[in-house]
Image (spheres, grey):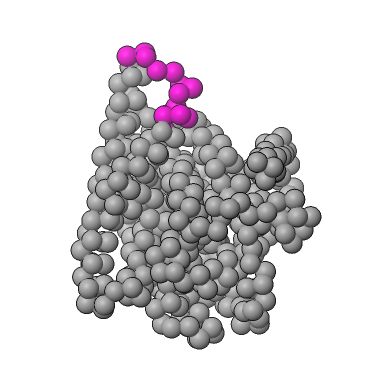
């Protein structure tokens, strides 16, 4: 119980400070909130003053998989609610390019780097590459929201990074499952199960389920609002309950619950009569703080320093090469098909800011649970830390180098037929 209260104290103090000093942190502090939380975990953990230790459940991949799954579902719902109404439909071609060819290329580049530098088997390398493919919605949100971001980064870039980060957490699921199946089943059986069950049922089914539940929930809320039997203050609880309902239904049906949660948020946002963006933005911020920051503190405490030392110079080189080659060349190569990115600075900013975070922690725990390959944890955790450090330190300086929106840009970014206030 003493350990529990230490965790409550640390998480509470962090959230209180970030809440009280919100504007100061966003304008003056050069570390993103996730990186600040990781630094606190390191300082209070075994490598620091030893106030915090890993709770017993932290040694169980099954427990950590479920914790990070819920965290991601909540974060992705918040991202979906923050996007302009109809944004994914309006920009579906660009999203298809980055979520299709983009993710495949990023997974392949990362996997080949792991294969070449660490000498592991091909499918183990591809598994590591797949886990670090997705852009983390939580870290990305801290980069593209707040006074500095909204003042300097064009809305077209902020919305595109947000939409990609929300969608690819679930869309990367087939890329992670393919090497898992290849490592645990005969080749023919693995490919057949991947094509039919993983893609056909778990992914396509999740899209259909999320769309149906999200749209239905929006219509029910609109009916209750018209009947004057609901208060606006219930919106926060309602969208949070929707997240849990969608995630629960998806998992009971063995579907991709993270993807279903994001699609549900998009469907809710597109239905008529939904809340205004200002309220959704506040919901997203609250969800991020209470559900996400303690997870990053836990990551700071759980860093496997010994495993990193074992990797040696190869680990450092891998981290640097993954940061430089995993995403920037891919986005630059595909820039012609990404219509929201109109200038070289748009492309450069988007190419650099594809941070690795909790989504990667979820998939590495998921992979360890399915394969028993605990040796991939030091590799993936090093890549997560390197991304948090590099992207967290560069977010504010590079954001200030971006040209702000013009009035004509804001008009072009608005989905066709949408209400300027909707």
Which residue appears farthest toward the right when viewing the image?
49
Q: Residue at x 62, y 73 (%)?
A: 307
- Nearer-the-camera pick, 189 or 372: 372
Up/down of 12 relative to 255, above or below: above
Up/down of 246 relative to 348, above or below: above
**Residue 237 at x, y percent in the picture:** 46, 29
Q: Is residue 27 magenta?
A: no
**Residue 377 at x, y percent in the picture:** 54, 68
Rendering quarter of residue 416? top left
- Nearer-the-camera pick, 227 or 157: 227
Up/down of 302 relative to 378, above or below: above
Q: Residue at x 45, y 50 (%)?
A: 66
Which residue appears farthest toward the top when viewing the image?
228
Is 49 left or right of 351, judged from the image as shown? right
Visible residue check, residue 267: no
Q: Residue at x 61, y 82 (%)?
A: 314
What predominant SS class does the magenta segment belong to?
A: helix
Number of numbered discs? 0
**Residue 215 at x, y percent in the picture:** 29, 36
Magenta-colored span: 227-239
- The quadrant of the image that shows the N terminus is top right
- The quadrant of the image that shows the C terminus is top left
Q: Residue at x 54, y 84 (%)?
A: 117
- Nearer-the-camera pick, 374 or 130: 374
Visible residue check, residue 183: yes
**Residue 18 at x, y percent in the picture:** 69, 41
Rendering quarter of residue 58? bottom right
- Nearer-the-camera pick, 402 or 93: 93
């Amino acid at each position: 119980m003493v350990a529990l209260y230490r965790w409550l104290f640390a998480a509470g103090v962090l959230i209180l400070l970030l809440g009280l000093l919100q504007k100061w942190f966003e304008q003056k502090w050069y570390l993103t909130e996730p990186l600040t939380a990781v630094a606190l975990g390191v300082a209070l953990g075994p490598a620091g003053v030893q106030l915090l230790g890993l709770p017993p459940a932290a040694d169980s991949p099954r427990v950590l998989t479920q914790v990070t799954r819920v965290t991601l579902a909540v974060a992705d719902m918040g991202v979906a609610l923050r996007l302009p109404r109809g944004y994914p439909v309006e920009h579906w071609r660009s999203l298809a390019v980055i979520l299709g060819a983009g993710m495949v290329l990023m997974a392949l580049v990362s996997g080949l780097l792991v294969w070449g530098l660490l000498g592991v088997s091909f499918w183990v390398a591809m598994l590591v590459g797949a886990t670090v493919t997705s852009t983390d919605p939580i870290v990305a949100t801290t980069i593209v929201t707040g006074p500095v971001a909204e003042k300097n980064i064009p809305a077209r870039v902020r919305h595109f990074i947000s939409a990609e980060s929300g969608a690819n957490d679930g869309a990367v699921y087939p890329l992670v499952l393919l090497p898992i199946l290849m490592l645990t089943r005969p080749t023919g059986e693995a490919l057949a199960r991947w094509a039919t069950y993983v893609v056909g049922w778990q992914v396509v089914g999740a899209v259909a389920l999320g769309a149906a539940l999200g749209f239905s929930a929006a219509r029910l809320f609109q009916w209750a609002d018209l009947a004057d039997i609901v208060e606006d203050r219930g919106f926060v609880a309602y969208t949070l309950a929707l997240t849990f309902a969608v995630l629960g239904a998806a998992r009971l049906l063995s579907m991709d619950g993270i993807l279903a949660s994001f699609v549900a948020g998009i469907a809710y946002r597109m239905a008529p009569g939904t809340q205004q963006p200002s309220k959704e933005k506040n919901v997203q911020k609250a969800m991020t703080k209470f559900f996400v920051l303690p997870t990053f503190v836990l990551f700071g405490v759980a860093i496997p320093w010994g495993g990193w030392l074992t990797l040696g110079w190869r680990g450092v080189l891998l981290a640097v090469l993954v940061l430089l080659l995993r995403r920037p060349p891919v986005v630059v190569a595909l820039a012609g098909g990404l219509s929201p990115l109109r200038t070289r600075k748009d492309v450069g900013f988007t190419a650099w800011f594809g941070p690795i975070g909790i989504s990667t922690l979820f998939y590495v725990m998921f992979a360890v649970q399915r394969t028993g390959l605990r040796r991939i944890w030091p590799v993936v955790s090093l890549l997560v830390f390197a991304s948090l450090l590099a992207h967290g330190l560069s977010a504010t300086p590079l954001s200030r180098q971006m040209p702000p929106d013009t009035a004509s840009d804001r008009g072009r970014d608005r989905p066709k037929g949408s209400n300027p206030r909707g």
